[in-house]
Image: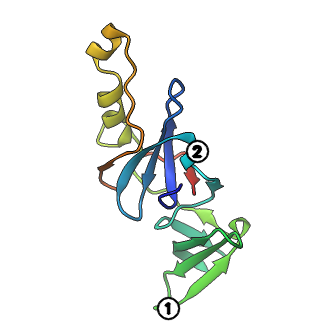
Amino acid sequence: TTFGSGVLQSVNPTTGVHYVFIPSFGAMCYLQPDQVLRPLKAAVGEDISTPYGEGKVYRYRLSDNKYEIKLAWGNNAMLYANAETFDRIDDRLEDKGGFGMGWILKFFYSREEDKDEGTQRSRSNSFSVLSQSGVSMKSLR
């Protein structure tokens, strides 16, 4: 995104607003389509698995489409890799009625008074800080 790499939670089909969680600063962003630049395999701060062991995405370089990955086994071990050379480790909590992302989105976007009035709420360009647990579908930059 224009605010850094994040994880797409969902897209509102009526307004086109993209709900993107940005793990590097723990925020949920409500973005217009033009603020989503391109899909990524993993966002900054996400855990990944490589042929050299597990690590965390430290930075994504748009200029050469490379990921800088801090490997878990070394103090300063860095791997510079293409997306094809690693896999995401998605160990976040699934939304099974608990405290994942789905309950808060349902709370804000499916309230009864909104349904009765027939109005559509939009939160484009707004931020709200959340915990880092949530259901991810796709990573974006």
Residue at left 49%, top 30%? Answer: 12
Residue 93 higher or lower than 46, as above or below: above
Could you tell me residue 32's position as x and y percent?
A: 51, 40
Taking the image as shown, residue 1 lies to the left or right of residue 115, namely: right
Q: How many marks?
A: 2
Residue at left 52%, top 56%? Answer: 2
Residue type for callout 2: Asp
Could you tell me residue 91's position as x and y percent?
A: 45, 57
Residue at left 49%, top 90%? Answer: 74
Q: Earlier in the sequence, mark 1 or mark 2?
A: 2
Could you tell me residue 109's position as x and y percent?
A: 35, 26
Q: Could you say whether the residue bearing mark 1 is in a helix, strand or loop?
A: loop
Taking the image as shown, residue 44 lies to the left or right of residue 82, namely: left
> Gap in Å between the C-alphas at discs 1 and 2?
36 Å
**Mark 2 lies on residue:** 34
Taking the image as shown, residue 61 lies to the left or right of residue 24, namely: right
Picture quarter with the C terminus: bottom right
Could you tell me residue 7's position as x and y percent?
A: 50, 52
Residue at left 53%, top 81%? Answer: 71
Front position in the image: 124 or 51: 124
Q: Is residue 108 visible?
A: yes
What label sits on residue 76 in the rendered view? 1
